[in-house]
Image (spheres, helix red, strand yellow):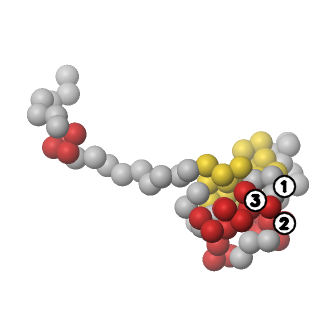
Amino acid sequence: MPLLTVALPPGSVLADALRELGLREDEVDGEYGLIALDPDTGRFALRVHATAAARLAADTAATVFADPPVESVERESMGRDEPDR
């Protein structure tokens, strides 16, 4: 899911973001929620499905960022045979 930064009124909650951005609940990561990056200026982060991100990037002042999944990496797949020192 792409990560967006958006400008909303200070003090906004997820329901406000859905309404302001024209999103449905199934288009956002409700567990991630709406994160206040700069509450005084109304700058927030929100994870949305790729189709919603594309729509918002074209229609609003949303900035879209990649949000690749973070996974553990096995030592063998890294080609490391020596222990860390």
Give the SS element for disc 2: helix
Residue picked out by circle 2: 20
Question: How many other residues sit within 10 Å of disc 3, few (<14), some (14-19) or many (≥20)?
Answer: few
Q: In which quarter of the image is residue 12?
A: bottom right
| Of pointers 3 and 1, the one earlier in the residue sequence | 1
Q: Is the residue under label 1 in contact with that under label 2 (CB below 8 Å)?
A: yes
Q: Is the residue under label 3 in contact with that under label 2 (CB below 8 Å)?
A: no
- Real-space Cα distance between discs 2 and 3? 15 Å
* Quadrant where the N terminus is found in the figure: bottom right
Question: How many other residues sit within 10 Å of disc 2, few (<14), some (14-19) or many (≥20)?
Answer: few
Please indicate whether residue 15 sits to the left or right of residue 79 in the image.
Answer: right
Residue 51 visible somewhere in the drawing: yes
- Real-space Cα distance between discs 3 and 1? 17 Å
Q: Is residue 41 above or below residue 10?
A: above
Q: Which residue is drawn at 15% across and 30% down?
A: 83
Give the SS element for disc 1: loop
| Of pointers 2 and 1, the one earlier in the residue sequence | 1
Q: Quadrant of residue 52?
A: bottom right
Mark number displayed over residue 8: 1
| Of pointers 2 and 3, the one earlier in the residue sequence | 2
Q: Residue at x 68, y 76 (%)?
A: 25
Query: Residue flagged by tag 1: what amino acid is it?
Result: Leu
Give the foreground label among 3 and 1. Answer: 3
Q: Which residue is drawn at 85% across and 43% down?
A: 41
Q: Estimate the x, y position of residue 10 in percent, counting from the top left.
A: 86, 51
Q: Estimate the x, y position of residue 11 in percent, counting from the top left.
A: 84, 55
Give the foreground label among 2 and 3. Answer: 3
Furthest residue in direction top, as rendered: 85
Question: How many other residues sit within 10 Å of disc 1, few (<14), some (14-19) or many (≥20)?
Answer: some
Residue picked out by circle 3: 58
